[in-house]
Image (cartoon, helix red, strand yellow):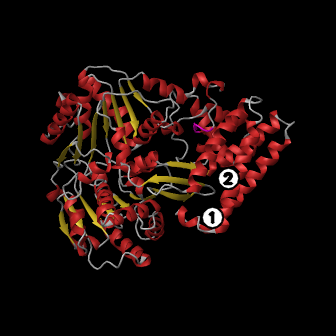
Amino acid sequence: MLARHIQGYSARDVQVQMAEAVCDAINNKSDLVVEAGTGVGKTFAYLIPALLSGKQVIISTGSKNLQEQLFYKDLPSLLSMLDISPKVALLKGRNNYLCQDLMEKQLNGCDSLDPKVLDDLLRINQWAGQTSDGDLGGLTSVSENADVLPLIASSREKCTGKRCDHYEVCFTRKARSRAMDAKVIVVNHHLFFADRVLKETGFAELLPDSDVVVFDEAHLLSDIAVTYFGQQTSTRGLTELLNSIIEIYRKELRDSPQIEALTSRCISQLNDWHQQMFDRDGSDWRQLMGDKDLAACSWGLLKELQSLEALLQSHVGRSEDLDDGLEKLNGFTNKLALFFQCENNQAAYSVEYGHRYLTLRIAPINVARECEKLFDAQTSWVFTSATLQINRDLTLFTKGLGIAKARQLILDSPFDYPNNALLCVPRHLSKVSNQEAAVRELVDIATQAINAAQGRTFILFTSHRMMNACARVLQSRVAYPLLVQGQGSKQSLLKKFRQLGNGVLLGTGAFWEGVDVRGKLLSCVIIDKLPFVSPDDTLYKARADSISREGKDPFSTISLPQAVISLNQGVGRLIRDEKDKGVLILCDNRIVNRPYGQAFLNSLPPMARTRDMGKVVNFLKQIK
């Protein structure tokens, strides 16, 4: 049946093994963890059993790309082939949808907008009249990094619910309504965890309880779970809220000038606190709070906000908008108090610096206990990814999510890696800490490979700084078109790469996974460094301290496994089809001259290996 309906389909034993394992998990209400190497065909291997089961299924992905591929391509193909028609819904986080109310307000106040923002806003307004679902992922006329998007994207903080003039046609509300009524729902991991945490706290749920949940790109789950079992708050939202309270005063409550006076004091205190934070620029909140001046400023800010909260409480009932504002202010003050108090020894308290605002995060060091409660026995849970194992072992993944009893299965790629792929760690590389030498060397190596491959190359970086430094030098060294992350949206860059046929794409984390370029369009992947987490990362430091107290080694327990999985994701961009051929160049000799390098090599596909760039050039020239 598959061969008749799916163009280019070929039978694979590993795909059948995975499908049978998924069947067993669904029938027995058990848990399954499957690493399925590139080419196993894991999407069909879980979709077909899930669809044929007739049960309610949630499929959760780590990326919007895969979410859209499942919903718009794979599911329609399989439903047509199987001749079944369950209701299917796609649901994204609310900030992926256009808010008609916010767009109307921006258009009404467009005189104060930057010309570029106004131009983008008018493009979005034109698109709004054509879209059926309001999904901003379908908006191609505006860059995904455009400044206008946060101004018009749906947001819980700005939502007025049933009082909104656009409530009946609200894109976010309609998407959620479709999901609650569907048999098969495609979501992403962030939305899934947000929904589960809302249920735990007794708030409205977004998703129905389902019989089967499949997590694709499951290697991302642990980090995402940390976000949702912790807390985070952005000072951007607080700034916007305070400004909106002053607007409400001016429009509705001019008889209460103390509202404006106290809110203005809060804004001033928040600005002072922002200034002090940016002057120090530290990410570890526990260390920052050791500074007496900053601590005093922090508690002073909280005291002002609590005073404003008490004042607004005395005006409850006079304005619906002010009542909403009071509820949101209460949420901010509670989160700030929790963050400033810094009392949980089993959590990391970190600060992330944006352009003008801060994000404050409380992240649990270990999420396994919370996840144990999440993955209940009434549901069949399936976890799959191309990168879950370390040294042929899935235990680290299962322990990290509290699913140690799940069945474990490793299915290797059916592709002919020994003959079709070459791994090169070039000789005579400098120490990775010397960035100037690293840029020079990487550009020299990349130039040879790009010319031999006639473009058709990805260069993946572990930092934006290194990417931009190499891009500047490469522009004068190669004749092929360069596409650099940030020049456009991820999808627009990939589309251009495919159209050009001889492009060179430079990217960081976003391009290490969820990117599928098949055939001769991509013949070479170059990676600048082994992707170890920064030792200064606040959550890593907190986890490392906890691991050290248990008498274990943080490097081998946390840092090394994370880097192995990240490298595997980058390597996975190269060979996407059984006929693909290509070269992987890793410009980091630690993989061959450090003892831990073997853990990386054991977890990579079985590619032929060389240290000779001459062999790389010859191999690439033979790929016609």
Residue position for label 1: 278
Q: Residue furthest left?
A: 13
Please tell me whether mark 1 or mark 2 is closer to you in this view: 2
Question: Under tag 2, what secondary structure?
Answer: helix
- The magenta-colored residue range is 153-157
Work out how far the residue at label 1 is from the one at label 2, CA to CA, in angstroms. Answer: 18 Å
Q: Is residue 350 above or below residue 95?
A: below
Residue 389: assigned label: none
Residue 339 image point, x, y percent: 56, 53
**Residue kind at label 1, given as amino acid type:** Phe
From the viewer's perspective, tell me whether residue 266 is left or right of residue 603: right
Q: Quadrant of the N terminus?
A: top left
Q: Residues within 10 Å of mark 2 (few under 14, many from 20)?
A: many
Q: How many discs mark residues in the rendered view?
A: 2
Residue located 66% across and 42% down the image: 329
Helix, strand or loop for the magenta stretch, by majority: loop
Residue at 48% x, 27% y is 176
Q: Which residue is mark 2?
A: 302
Q: Quadrant of residue 525?
A: bottom left
In percent of width and height, residue 407 lies at 19, 42
Q: Quadrant of the C terminus?
A: bottom left
Identify the mark nearer the N-term, 1 or 2. 1
The structure residue drawn at horizontal position 32% and vertical position 25%, both measured from the top left corner, is 56
For mark 1, does the 10 Å Cα neighbourhood hold few (<14), some (14 to 19), or many (20 or more) residues? some
Q: Is residue 451 visible?
A: no
Q: Nearer the viewer, residue 26 or 378?
A: 378
Q: Is residue 299 left or right of residue 532?
A: right
- Residue 208 visible to the viewer: yes
Residue 101: which quarter of the image?
A: top right
Q: Is residue 154 magenta?
A: yes
Q: Amino acid at mark 2?
A: Leu
